[in-house]
Image (cartoon, helix red, strand yellow):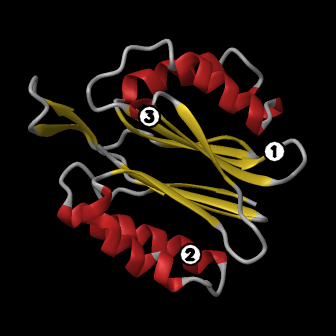
């Protein structure tokens, strides 16, 4: 599967994920690694990052559509619209595909969107406020990893600085990789300030 974490504050967005891609057998009850270095956290431009988990083919096809645009000039809303329109056109396996899109909108406000094919591509928007950042994760079984998320992210707020938060997010994924074989400890990250 994968595991991607995004924390979005009023003046930052940090997204961290692993880099393992797995393939499932025909009955989807077992998997095996096929790539240890797939890029699943991407910085689209200075204002926008995305992360994906699940079936990578629909997301890669939708990301390819972004290459037809001058990505440096795209807004957060435009990236969300292009990816959503194009990902819906792609066949998706039983695993589904999930995206986090985070960054500054055209007004300079930080936002985060989550798109999940298993929820009929419903877009969930998360907006930080002055007291609490927005937080989301996609990938691994959430019940299994919730204690780890609590330990490294949720129970450590407020953080001393963004470097501390980034290191906690990395440690979180490294620990998840020890209990979930679909996640590795090769970390990718994107920071938007």
**Counting other residues with Cα less than 10 Å from the Cα at mark 1, is it few (<14), some (14-19), or many (20 or more)?**
some
Q: Earlier in the sequence, mark 2 or mark 1?
A: 1
x then y, percent, for residue 128? 71, 63
As measured in the structure, the alpha-carbon distance from the residue carrying label 3 to the one carrying label 1 is 24 Å
x then y, percent, for residue 46? 75, 46
Give the residue pinned by disc 1.
105
Above-or-below relation of 77 to 113: above
Q: Are marks 3 and 1 in contact (CB under 8 Å)?
A: no
Badge 1 marks a residue whose secondary structure is: loop
Check the picture and name the quadrant holding the C terminus. bottom right
Q: Are marks 3 and 2 in contact (CB under 8 Å)?
A: no
Give the residue pinned by disc 3.
119
Badge 3 marks a residue whose secondary structure is: helix
Above-or-below relation of 98 to 187: above
Name the image quarter holding residue 93.
top left
As measured in the structure, the alpha-carbon distance from the residue carrying label 2 to the one carrying label 1 is 23 Å
Give the residue pinned by disc 2.
165
């Amino acid at each position: 599967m994968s595991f991607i974490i995004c924390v979005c504050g009023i003046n930052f967005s940090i997204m961290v994920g692993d880099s393992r891609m797995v393939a499932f057998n025909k009955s989807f009850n077992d998997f095996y690694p096929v790539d240890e270095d797939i890029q699943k956290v991407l910085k689209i431009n200075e204002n926008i990052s995305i992360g994906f988990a699940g079936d990578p083919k629909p997301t890669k096809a939708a990301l390819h559509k972004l290459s037809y645009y001058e990505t440096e000039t795209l807004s957060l809303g435009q990236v969300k619209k292009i990816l959503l329109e194009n990902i819906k056109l792609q066949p998706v396996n039983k695993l589904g595909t999930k995206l986090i899109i985070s960054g500054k909108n055209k007004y300079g406000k930080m936002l985060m969107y989550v798109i999940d094919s298993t929820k009929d591509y419903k877009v969930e928007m998360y907006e930080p406020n002055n007291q609490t950042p927005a937080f989301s994760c996609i990938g691994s079984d959430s019940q299994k990893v919730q204690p780890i998320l609590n330990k490294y992210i949720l129970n450590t707020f407020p953080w001393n600085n963004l470097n501390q938060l980034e290191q906690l997010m990395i440690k979180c994924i490294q620990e998840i990789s020890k209990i979930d074989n679909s996640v590795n400890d090769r970390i990718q990250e994107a920071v938007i300030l």
